[in-house]
Image (tube, helix red, strand yellow):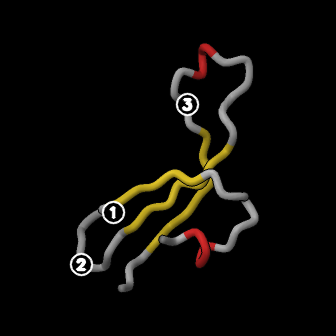
Amino acid sequence: MRSRFAALRVRSAHRDYWRKEPHLEQWLLIEWPKTEKEPTKYWLSNLPASIALRKLVP
């Protein structure tokens, strides 16, 4: 199985107004198959920032 992926580091902003510190950064992994007009799947991952994209992709 093959597809196109993008990955970037993000911070969830959900209910940050209740927190003393912002949420930790996570990976946002996006799948965009070539046959689709827009991305089809999204994942959040708490794996380390240093992980390679090849290991991040499911």
The CA span between labels 3 and 2 is: 32 Å
Label 2 sits on residue? 35
Which residue is more in the foreground, 55 or 8?
55
Residue at the image position 24 percent from the left and 78 percent from the top: 35
Q: Amino acid at mark 3?
A: Ala
Residue displayed at 32% across by 75% down: 33
Task: Give how far across and how far down residue 41 sits, in percent.
Answer: 35, 60
Residue 15 image offset from top left, x and y in percent: 53, 21
**Labels 3 and 1: the sequence-earlier one:** 3
According to the picture, the residue beneath numbered tag 1 turns out to be: 39
Checking the image for residue 13, the label placed there is 3
Q: Nearer the viewer, residue 39 or 44?
A: 44
| Residue 16 screen position, x and y as percent | 60, 22
* Left or right side of 22 for 2: left
The reply, left or right, for residue 27 in relation to residue 39 is right
Distance of label 3 from label 1 (alpha carbons): 22 Å
Query: First in sequence: mark 3 or mark 2?
Result: 3
At a point 46% along the width and 71% down the height, the residue shown is 5
